[in-house]
Amino acid sequence: MVRMPADRPATLAAWLRTRSDAQLAALLAARPDVARPAPSDVVALASRLAVPVSVDRALDDLDAATLQVLDVVLLAPTDGVPAEDVHAALPGLPADVVDAAVERLTVRALLWGEDVLHAPDQVRRAVRHPAGLGRRAADLRVTLPADLPAAVGALDPAEREVLERLAGDRPVGHLPETGAGPATPARRLLQAGLLARIDALNVELPREIGLLLRGDAPYGPPRLRPEAAAVERDPAVVDRQAAGAALEVVGRVGELLAVLEEEPAGLLRSGGVAVRDRKRLAKGLTVSEADAGWLLELAFAAGLLDVGGPHRDEWLPTRGYDLWREQTLPDRWATLAAGWLESTRLPSLVGSRDVAGKAVNALSPDLVRHTAPAIRRSALAALVDSPRGRGLAPDDLVALLRWRTPRRADRLAPVPDMLTEAGRIGVLVGGVLSSGGRGLLTRGEEGAADGMQGLLPEPVDHVLAQPDLTLVAPGPLVAGLADTLAVVADVESSGGATVFRVSESSVRRALDAGWSATDLHDLFTRASRTPVPQALDYLVDDVARQHGRLRVGAVECYVRSDDHGLLSQVLGDRRTAAAELRRLAPGVLVSGLGADEVLTVLRQAGYAPAGESPGGAVLTRPPARPVRRAGARAAAVGRGTPADAGRGRGDRPRDPGRRRRAGRPPGRAGAAGPGGHHRGHAGAAVPRDPRGHPGVAGLRRRPGLGQPARGAAGVTGRWFPPGVGRAPAGEPHLRGAPDHLGGAGRRGSTGRRQRLT
């Protein structure tokens, strides 16, 4: 045992008192978890340094060579090891590597002392198998043979192979199944006392046997930094290839979000996107299902996609998408790259099977791994120190990471997939960091955008019209023109140059959105740098000539009479203005209000209208029903009590046998009550005509376009038909229509569904 001189510190706390301010500052910087809140004195600091979680975190950051130096101190037969003995114990490690390892360990207080190095007790407990050796036989409660070398030498080859395998870097093994019988080599070694049972299935090799088998290398082979052949590439070529990948991913994400803006993907009950929606997106983007899942994950990581909708059951573009699409291409790419780097999700697991054998969906909570950002950064940070144009192959990079953090080697399984993702984004090209990737790691999102400046093309505001009815965009389009072309044409191919196809269906879609033939001619003339082909003009005129010859509309009720003069009098009467009547044809007036309201207005104006069924029969009200007395049954099937009639929809008791469908409008009529009368929400009977049709007096009205609408619970709003949004000023406008027609000129601002906040 090494005796401690009187002037040497005897404990960790005493050794900390001898450290200078600069050394203590370095300790707190290397282990920041012990610095908050500030320790009151060195005794409190020493106590925090011994916390198991803090010790494990500090050990996880050490490389293999540093851990091998620590193993020498932990395996020493005495409490302290002179510093010069450490060099002698590891002849395979260069002296400067050993000195740097000792410095790293003492700075983190994982070893303490100057001439004699000591390991704190908590460090000894944290390193369960130093140098890959098991515990002592005494700790395992195993009695070894008196002549251990002779006993080991007498083993047969199969038994010695088992011992040599356990004497490697992991001294714990798993026993074979009991069906193999007691004559297996492992069980014979267990019976001979050369293995120790630690539970019903696992055994451990005593340290003494491991040291005997290792011979002259008790600490194993020297753990030197792996020297792999560097990958050399021209930096200019790397940046050009990275720019191509960046342009591709920015365009694909924009197309994905545009599709989801038109038709959102449903949210599964377990979270994520259904396979059906992923297939639809893959078909719409002409990519594989795996690529569609990757793009969904990338958009979500960048904050451009999230759960929304009236019931928060759909995947929709966020408000950030509107800002993102207006940015320059380098800034858009930087947003995607930074979101991917800091994401806590593993997109590579989409489609894999969980423990229950079920496939993992895109955007599922099962993809969350909180260690993912640290793993990505550590993998890419290993390349930052290399000169520009130099990198490592994926296998060599994984080997380097295993040497840098051997205690976290089990977390490095996703690294190959992460490197593939980095290549798809443009952060990495063939194992070499691009200028944008290097800026992302050193200066964040701003550095990534600066690294891509000058490499990505500027957005263009024109196309090239071709005789085959295609429009070629010679680069990424400005947002306004891209939205306009998405209405009047279909994307035929994308990439560096996007090809749009103008067809009958696309022209008809534009006309449905509110464009006229003149608007389309002006658009093509203004947007094309080449003369507009005559075939394109003919196509627009032919489709416009046929468009609108048939008209389809919706009204709530009609007023008809054979007396055309009477209808003209009603239409010109100021007292009937509240009925919102207009002439549809000779003898027919229509209104956007309900039939019961129009009847009320006409009667109050002094006219004598009658309700009419869809078959043309005049409706009459049935005689009043007798009032039920106390003691009678409170409610019949499908019929409410007078008390129910005063309740709101939310207060009325529900029939447990009735199942309401999801998304059913609150104002829809209920089931038929006794006597064949249709029942409303308040339980009142609705009259029927002789043919069985419900009468007009009980019908709920649908509000007119932009008119106030009242729900069953009294909540009011404004009603707009599908496909019509709301402009900022509250006026309805058509999606994708030109500015002078009331549209905003771009789909992103007039989506049919409400955006997220």
Image: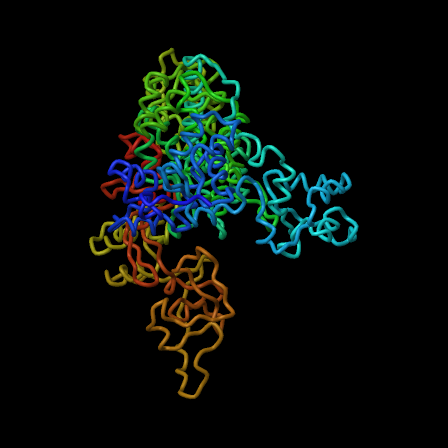
As drawn, is 728 to the left or to the right of 561? left
Q: In this view, does 308 lie above or below 441?
A: below
The image shows residue 605, relative to residue 10, as above or below, that is: below
Outermost residue, left direction? Answer: 574
**Near-viewer residue (83 or 720):** 83
Query: Does residue 507 appear anywhere in the picture?
Result: no
Number of numbered labels in the structure image: 0
The residue located at (45%, 31%) in the rendering is: 379
Write down the quadrant of residue 317 in the picture: top left
Q: Position of residue 634 (x, y in %)?
A: 43, 81
Quarter of the image with the C terminus is top left
682 above or below 291?
below
At horizontal 57% and vertical 31% (from top left) the residue drawn is 221
Position of 729 compared to 431: left or right?
Answer: left
Question: For residue 96, which quarter of the picture?
Answer: top left
Q: Residue at x 40, y 30 (%)?
A: 100
Percent coordinates x, y for residue 205 in the rendering: 63, 46
- Residue 226 image offset from top left, x and y in percent: 52, 25
The extreme bottom residue here reads: 631
Percent of width and height locating residue 470: 46, 18
Which residue sits at x=36%, y=27%? Answer: 440
Figure colour scheme: rainbow
Q: Is residue 303 left or right of residue 140?
A: left
User: Which of the two residues, 420 or 382, is positioned nearer the viewer here?
Assistant: 382
Q: Which of 29 and 740 is in front in this view?
A: 29
Res. 379 in view: yes
